[in-house]
Amino acid sequence: MQVRIKILAGGVLEKTIEVEEGSTYSDILAELGINPETVVVMVEGRPVPIDDVVDSGRIDILRIVSGG
């Protein structure tokens, strides 16, 4: 399955990767070297749990930016 990924915040990076059937969003983050505690994974504008199985061909990864 091909998944198109857009990473948002601090610029926009778009890429397409191949993932195995049954992969989770957490698996994608691990493959991209992204700490899951620093992002929110969005599908169709809605956040999804990172342990859900990937069922969309397009996801957005929004980096969480916090300040004091």
Image (cartoon, helix red, strand yellow):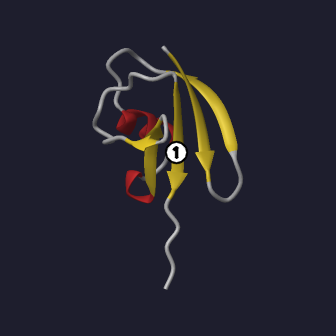
Residue 44 lies left or right of residue 47; in this view the side is: right
Circle 1 sits in a helix, a strand or a loop, which is it? strand
Identified at 67% across, 36% down, the residue is 14
From what the image shows, is residue 17 above or below residue 36? above
Relative image position of residue 67 (x, y in whole percent): 51, 79
- As drawn, the residue found furthest toward the right would be 11
Relative to 5, say whether 9 is above or below: below
User: Left of 20 or right of it: where is 62?
Assistant: right
Q: Amino acid at mark 1?
A: Ile
Please indicate whether residue 12 sits to the left or right of residue 60 in the image.
right
Name the residue at 62% across, 57% down: 9
Which x, y percent locates residue 27?
38, 34
Which residue sits furthest left? 51
The residue under the point 52% across, 45% down is 61
Q: Relative to 56, say whether 39 is above or below.
A: below
Residue visible at 31% across and 42% down? 49
Seen from the viewer's position, the closer of residues 44 and 11 is 44
| Pointer 1 residue | 61
Image quadrant of residue 16?
A: top right
